[in-house]
Image (cartoon, grey):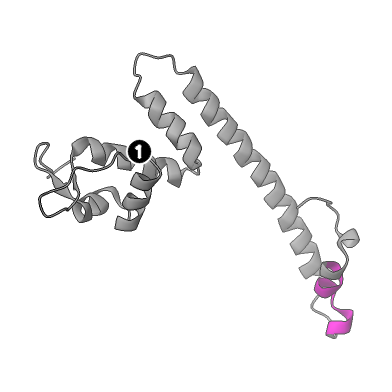
Amino acid sequence: MKGLSPTKPLPIGTLARTAGVKVPTIRYYEQIGLMNAAPRTESNRRTYGASDVRRLKFIRHARDLGFEIEEIRQLLALAGEPDRPCADADAIARQHLADIDDRIARLTALRGEIARMVDCGGHGSIGECRVIEVLADHDLCDHAHH
């Protein structure tokens, strides 16, 4: 973490800028227990250290990769046990990958349905519009689930 003192406490705004999140996001993560409650100054301002920066960057990166809050909570707990085998973290990532593959399949089917509606539509009046017709009758779709 270039330019940050490992010992000097950081205010919440600096932590937010350093980790690339908004201040309310940090407060939310504290509220749900992903971030530890920050110590406060005499004027009741939150202060953070280098470990908080690392943890918040971990959370942000996991969120960017689409991990859900509970998965991140589990991964953070595993990260706190460095001598533990990696199998549990790997299982979480494998399940997340399977979920992504499922979403891709559903989006591909969805794209196909929309493409068929658009390719067959756009001619004549609304009364003859394929887009309106298909949206009104799900049985006209090629896929039951999308």
Residue 14 at x, y = what percent? 19, 53
- Asked if residue 132 is among those painted magenta in the image, a careful observer would answer yes
Question: Tag 1: residue type?
Answer: Phe
Compared with residue 79, is residue 145 higher up or lower down, i.e. above or below? below
**Viewer-nearest residue: 46 or 65:** 46
* Image quadrant assignment for residue 75: top left
Residue plotted at (70% across, 45% down): 105
Q: Is residue 144 left or right of residue 73?
A: right
Q: Which residue is mark 1?
A: 58
**Viewer-nearest residue: 126 or 91:** 91
Q: Is residue 118 left or right of residue 47?
A: right
- Asked if residue 85 is among those painted magenta in the image, a careful observer would answer no
- Tally of marks: 1
The region drawn magenta spans 126-134
* Image quadrant assignment for residue 4: top left
Residue plotted at (39% across, 31% down): 76
Residue plotted at (56% across, 28% down): 94
Crowd band around label 1 with a 10 angstrom C-alpha radius: few (<14), some (14–19), many (20+):
some
Residue 36 at x, y = what percent? 30, 39
Q: Secondary structure at mark 1?
A: helix
Q: Is residue 90 left or right of residue 18?
A: right
